[in-house]
Amino acid sequence: MKTNLSIIILAAGQGTRMKSNTPKVLHKISGYEMLYYSIKEAKKLSDDVSVVLYHQASWVQQTMEKYFNDVTYHIQDHQNFPGTGGAVMGIKPKYSKTLVLNGDMPLIEAGELTNLVGNSKLTMSVLNLKNANGYGRVVVLNGAVRKIVEQKDCSDEELKINIANAGIYCFDTEFLLANLPKLTNNNNQKEYYITDLVEMAIEQNLEVIPVSVSEENFKGVNSKVDLANAEVIHQHRIKERFLANGVIMRLPETIYIESRVTIEGECILENGVTLLGKTKIINSHIKANSIVEDSLIEDSDIGPMARIRPQSILKDTHIGNFVEVKKGKLTGVKAGHLSYLGDCVIDSGSNIGAGTITCNYDGKNKYQTIIGKNVFVGSDTQLVAPLNIPDDVMIAAGTTVTKDVQSGDLVLSRTPQKMISKFFYKFFGAK
Ligand code: UD1
Ligand code: MG
């Protein structure tokens, strides 16, 4: 759906109210930085997307370049031309219409943005609010914008206006380029306001069309409170999508699912489940309070209270409570309780007893444990990697395995049990 549209995303502001050293637009929502979402939606509408940066520009640019390779970055001359108008200066949009978005609006959706693209020289997004505090105010008469004024420049009367500027505009590109050089910083903030272009259009007798947009989608994130609220809405959208696709969720509001997660087939997610990164769940049951990160879970049940760390692949496997798996490839395995299975491959029919630990780290390097088919690992076993246990091996409870073994072996490393007769009575006295 590429139109004759160029898009400019404003992301140069400092974001002081976030109270953070991390640039505002790099704060994450559902696993992606906020700016990611603005660029992603913009790219659905245009192949000419420019992002305006200034504060910590290279940090922001490098982060976005991980995801997008066809976006233009533009550094604002912030010292000489601060403000939303200054941000747009110096950009040469390719197409006849230019949509200006904000990088701190992670909930906007491409579909709704198309409503702003019309034939007039200028269309602007407005919100009809109960209380427009914090926003610039817009005077609308007979379906056209008559005046726009920033909150900090409002008279007492103007402060009562409840039509707010949502901060997104679609300009006729010729109009934009002809009028940008006329902007001044003659206002309380000594900034070059993009909103002054609205005033100029009105003065030039051009119709400025207000387009009402949804408050939820156009919410700007300016503080950590806004960030948390936006993430709640975003999470709600992700979970609605999976629920509609047939995933069962117990208490969905307690479940956290990042944007990259995919879920297929018949799945159950119990309360408190956290699915992170590029996790994929297929026909599986994830029980209460389990965490899965960057892993594939197929035809398996996990938890409650299990932690599956990155690069694990679990198929046809049962993982019980307090089991941690990291870089583990388990197929047809049962690990019911209290284990650490890191850097390992475990094959079908093998049973991992409670308290099993793959000792994968010697203080310098990580090593792998490979366990074949039908291996019975007794409780409280330490498997000191690198280690290769072939098919059909039995490891007795309490064993520390340090050497490779043969198929058919029983492996046992226990101090023989001693009994000292009557010791109890000598120590505690006779009862
Ligand atoms: C702006 C509007 C206001 C509107 C509100 C909606 C102006 C003058 N005011 O105010 O009418 O109600 O948005 O959210 O435009 N930015 C830059 N360079 C700068 C300054 C800002 O790129 O020099 C970017 C910011 O990173 C942000 C966006 O522009 O993404 C909006 O800036 P912000 O400071 O949040 O504007 P508001 O004061 O909220
Ligand atoms: Mg703002």
Image (cartoon, rainbow, N blue to C red):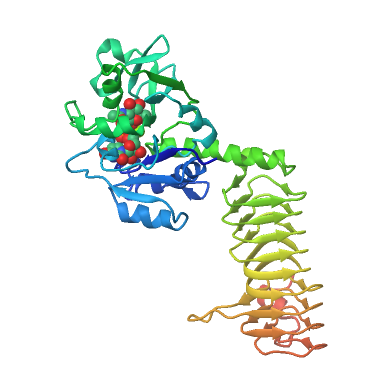
Residue 392 appears left or right of 188:
right
Question: Looking at the rendering, in which quadrant would you find the N terminus?
Answer: top right
Question: Who's the residue at 66% across and 56% down the image?
Answer: 280
Residue 218 appears left or right of 133:
right
Residue situated in front as seen by the camera: 415 or 205:
205
- Residue 145 in which image quadrant: top left
- Residue 178 in which image quadrant: top left
- Residue 98 in which image quadrant: top left
Relative vertical location of residue 417 with respect to residue 300 in this rendering, above or below: below
Question: Who's the residue at 50% across and 41% down the image?
Answer: 41
Return the x and y of residue 395 as percentages of the image width and height: 76, 81
Residue situated in front as seen by the camera: 259 or 273:
259
Residue 105 appears left or right of 276:
left
Question: Who's the residue at 63% across and 61% down the image?
Answer: 295
Return the x and y of residue 201 as percentages of the image width and height: 30, 21
Return the x and y of residue 247 as percentages of the image width and height: 73, 44
Residue situated in front as seen by the camera: 300 or 34:
34
Residue 167 appears in the picture as rendered: yes
Return the x and y of residue 348 as percentages of the image width and height: 79, 72
Residue 109 appears left or right of 10:
right
Relative vertical location of residue 334 with respect to residue 344 in this rendering, above or below: above
Question: Looking at the rendering, in which quadrant would you find the C terminus?
Answer: bottom right
